[in-house]
């Protein structure tokens, strides 16, 4: 039986840290659904459509990766997509508490869905979407932190600074 995993996140923006997790997840699972979370109460730099387009560009032609979007409870979405696994990346020990709480709550709501953690590669362990947005906003170069498609769109968002 093929095992489909769900890799959810805000991806605002998508970084090399996220890419690293997905590239490793496809070695383990038969299919990875990358799900862009939409939360109407959260202000984002990139709209849901922009984030999906960017992920589509990054993963175009990769048969084991599907890009989708969701709203509402993650476990309901996982079940609706037939995903038995949720993949999350852990960068540092400080991620653990939040991830632990989320995994436990998800397990209580959906005992049939397992959460799998992967250690983010050390090279990306200090990355965060907020940090990258701040650097870009202040005119810094983020080319080593995000895929070229994302870097290009970030430059379009902050043209005067780039
Ligand atoms: N490399 C680099 N950075 C990473 C990373 C990695 N491998 N993994 C996460 N990050 C960073 C992100 O860039 C982001 O940085 P920021 O805080 O500066 O923006 C931060 O870690 C967290 O991002 P992400 O992993 O995308 O999680 P999130 O908090 O944006 O999304 C959801 C979490 C969407 C999975 C969660 O809120 C959810 O499940 N929502 C649905 C509602 C629900 O079911 N709620 C109940 C849950 S119990």
Image (cartoon, rainbow, N blue to C red):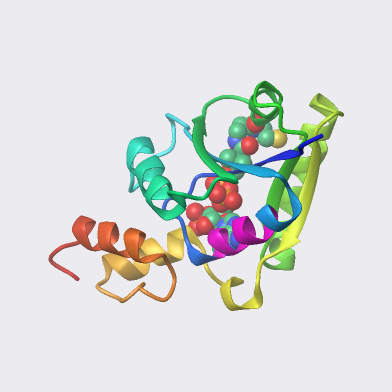
Residue drawn at (73%, 49%), measured in percent from left and top? 99
Residue 6 in picture, x, y percent from top left:
66, 40
Is the magenta region chiefly helix, strand or loop? Answer: helix
Residue drawn at (33%, 46%), measured in percent from left and top? 46
| Magenta-span inclusion, residue 151 | no
Image quarter for residue 152? bottom left
Residue drawn at (66%, 43%), measured in percent from left and top? 31
Compared to residue 6, the image places residue 147 above or below, namely below
| Magenta-span inclusion, residue 18 | yes
Compared to residue 70, the image places residue 101 above or below, namely below
Residue 48 in picture, x, y percent from top left:
38, 37
In the image, is 96 to the left or to the right of 18?
right
Q: Quadrant of the N terminus?
A: top right
Residue 148 in picture, x, y percent from top left:
35, 66
Q: Which residues are magenta?
A: 17-25
**How many numbered circles are shown?**
0
Q: Report whether residue 143 is seen.
A: yes
Q: Report whether residue 100 is seen.
A: no
Image quarter for residue 112? top right
Residue 102 in picture, x, y percent from top left:
73, 41
């Amino acid at each position: 039986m093929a095992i489909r995993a769900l890799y959810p996140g805000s991806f605002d923006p998508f970084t090399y840290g996220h890419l690293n997790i997905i590239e490793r997840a496809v070695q383990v699972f038969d299919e990875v659904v990358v799900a862009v979370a939409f939360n109407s109460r959260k202000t984002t730099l990139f709209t849901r459509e922009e984030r999906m387009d960017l992920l589509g560009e990054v993963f175009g032609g990769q048969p084991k990766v599907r890009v989708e979007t969701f709203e509402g409870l993650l476990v309901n979405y996982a079940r609706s997509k037939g995903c038995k696994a949720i993949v999350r990346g852990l960068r540092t020990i400080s991620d653990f508490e939040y991830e632990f709480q989320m995994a436990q709550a998800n397990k209580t709501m959906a005992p049939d869905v397992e959460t799998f953690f992967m250690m983010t590669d050390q090279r990306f362990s200090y990355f965060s979407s907020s940090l990258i947005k701040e650097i870009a906003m202040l005119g810094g170069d983020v080319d080593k932190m995000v895929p070229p498609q994302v870097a290009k769109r970030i430059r379009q968002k902050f043209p005067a600074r780039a």
